[in-house]
Image (cartoon, rainbow, N blue to C red):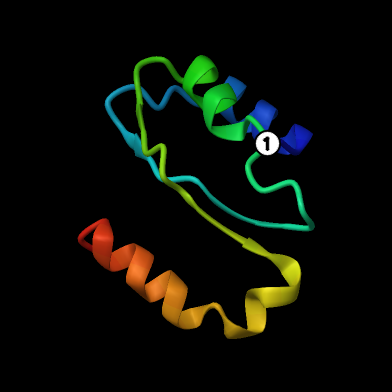
Amino acid sequence: MPQVLYSFFDEYDLSGKTIIPFNVHNGSRFSGTIETIQELEPGATVITDGFTVNEKDVPDAAEDVANWLTTLNY
């Protein structure tokens, strides 16, 4: 997880909020990020089936993103 996110979670208390992880990667997928967010924000609900896409597939990911958001009721 990028250092800036550690700083963000340190600065803000997201207790009672829902965190919906998503990212673009170059092969690492989430690699522990969701678990780290759960540890840093124990009072928040963290969606564990976040969306991740390889950077090479971003140009063709619009439909996948839309489908994922639909499963989240957005």
Look at the image and tell me in which quarter the C terminus lies: bottom left
Q: Residue at x 68, y 28 (%)?
A: 7
Residue 29, given in percent of the width and then of the height, sits at 66, 48
Q: Quadrant of residue 45?
A: top left
Name the residue type under label 1: Ser
Q: Quadrant of residue 52?
A: bottom right
Residue 50, given in percent of the width and then of the height, sits at 46, 48
In this view, 50 is above or below 4: below
Q: Residue at x 63, y 42 (%)?
A: 30
How crowded is the residue under tag 1: few (<14 C-alpha within 10 Å), some, or many (20+)? few
- Residue that badge 1 annotates: 31
| Residue at the far front in the pictured view | 27
Q: Is 46 placed left or right of 10 in the picture? A: left
Q: Quadrant of residue 68?
A: bottom left
In this view, 45 is above or below 39: below
In this view, 69 is above or below 3: below
Query: How many labels were placed on the picture?
Result: 1
Q: Secondary structure at mark 1?
A: loop
Residue 51, given in percent of the width and then of the height, sits at 49, 55
Q: Residue at x 79, y 58 (%)?
A: 26
Q: Residue at x 37, y 39 (%)?
A: 47
Q: Is 4 placed left or right of 69 in the picture? A: right
